[in-house]
Image (tube, helix red, strand yellow):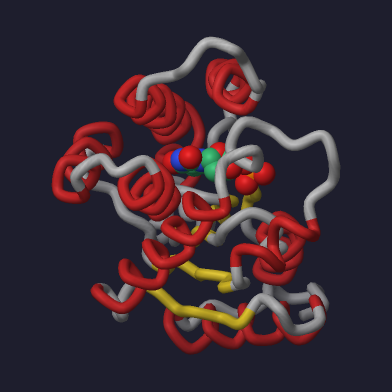
Amino acid sequence: MPGERRPPGRLICVEGGEGAGKTTQAQMLARAIGAHLTREPGGTALGERIRELLLTPSSEKLAARSELMLVLAARAQHLAERIEPLLEEGSHVVVDRFSGSTLAYQGYGRGLPIPEVRQACDIATNGRWPDLAILLDVPAPAGLARRREPSDRFEGESDDFHERVRDGFLAEAAAEPERWVVIDGTRPAGEVAGAVLESVRGRLGLEAPAGTAS
Ligand code: TMP
């Protein structure tokens, strides 16, 4: 009805280590539920410039706290400019990485204290956490083996770093099971997509819009 306010949209994020298949799954999910698709770091002009800074290998060593602040600056802009307006108008948003990645990479991976990283995420997002975080879990070596060359600044990190990231994602998912769902990302993409959609339906009650194939 004209003038009727739609309920706010849901924010769903797809998380995982390198080569977990997030991007493909985020695309398939967004299509299946008629959601807007975006990514981090990125999603706005500023965010994409920050992404470039973060991913381009450089001889200049980026301090862990600088990295954290860059990731969060991109997120704050993304929320203000894109995500919050979409949710407010009642659209659902699927984001390829969000605060779970910050905990896993800058917290567990780089070794910044987890409570500080969590607090910093809260400041950047004004307390916004996803309604559902989908972790595509893949053993770190298997994920890295799927990546193309040349590698970016994160892919070039040590095996230990990627193991810590994976363990960090799993620890976060275990600590907040009401927010997270863990899906075995080593299965064929079609099976993973089915499990992702099932979890979104089960947890959030979202269905494919009329006329959309699931
Ligand atoms: P991807 O789009 O290929 O996953 O690359 C994004 C990279 O950025 C990935 O290596 C993880 C990193 N990243 C962080 O370190 N912290 C974050 O909060 C986010 C969103 C991404």
Q: Quadrant of residue 22?
A: bottom right
Q: Nearer the viewer, residue 196 or 212?
A: 196
Q: With respect to residue 108, does 182 lie above or below?
A: below
Residue 67: x and y, percent?
A: 40, 26
Q: With respect to residue 171, does 24 lie above or below?
A: above
Quadrant in which ligand 1 is drawn = top right
Residue 151: x and y, percent?
A: 74, 37
Q: Quadrant of residue 149?
A: top right
Residue shown at the point (56%, 73%) measured from the top left = 137
Residue 209: x and y, percent?
A: 68, 72
Residue shown at the point (21%, 50%) measured from the top left = 114
Q: Nearer the viewer, residue 57 or 79?
A: 57
Residue 10: x and y, percent?
A: 44, 61
Quarter of the image that includes the C terminus: bottom right
Report if residue 90 is visible in the image. Answer: yes
Residue shown at the point (37%, 21%) measured from the top left = 63
Residue shown at the point (80%, 76%) measured from the top left = 189
- The answer to whether 154 appears left or right of 179 in the picture is right
- The answer to whether 204 appears left or right of 45 in the picture is left
Report if residue 5 is visible in the image. Answer: no
Q: Quadrant of residue 150?
A: top right
How many tags in the picture? 0
